[in-house]
Amino acid sequence: MSGAVSGTIWFIGFLFTIGYANLVWWKILLGIVIWPYFLGQALA
């Protein structure tokens, strides 16, 4: 349950960051693919 809630909060924050940073589409896709990997490496 808490994983689903934290995943939802993460996704909302990620969409907000994309909108706030005014990124182009290829940087958005790059961020969706690469950023969770680096986040997992930092938290592991």
Image: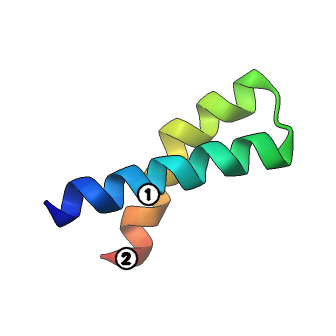
Q: Position of residue 11 (x, y in %)?
A: 47, 47
In-image side of 1 versus 26 (left or right)? left
Label pair 2/1, CB-CB below 8 angstroms: no
* 39 to the left or right of 28: left
Residue 4, how many percent across, how many down?
23, 53
Residue shown at 19% from the left, 66% from the top: 2
Describe the element under mark 2 as helix, strand or loop: helix
The amino acid type of the residue labelled 1 equals Ile
Q: Label 1, on which residue?
A: 9
Task: Name the kind of residue labelled 2 in the image.
Answer: Leu
Q: Nearer the viewer, residue 22 or 37?
A: 22
Q: CA distance from mark 2 to mark 1?
A: 17 Å
Vertical comparison of 34 with 27: above or below = below
Q: Could you say which is closer to the camera, residue 42 or residue 15?
A: 15
Residue 25 sits in quarter: top right
What residue would you read off at disc 2?
43
**Labels 2 and 1: the sequence-earlier one:** 1
Q: Residue at x 83, y 47 (%)?
A: 21
Q: Quadrant of the N terminus?
A: bottom left
> Mark 1: which secondary structure?
helix
Q: Could you tell whether 25 is left or right of 4 in the image?
A: right
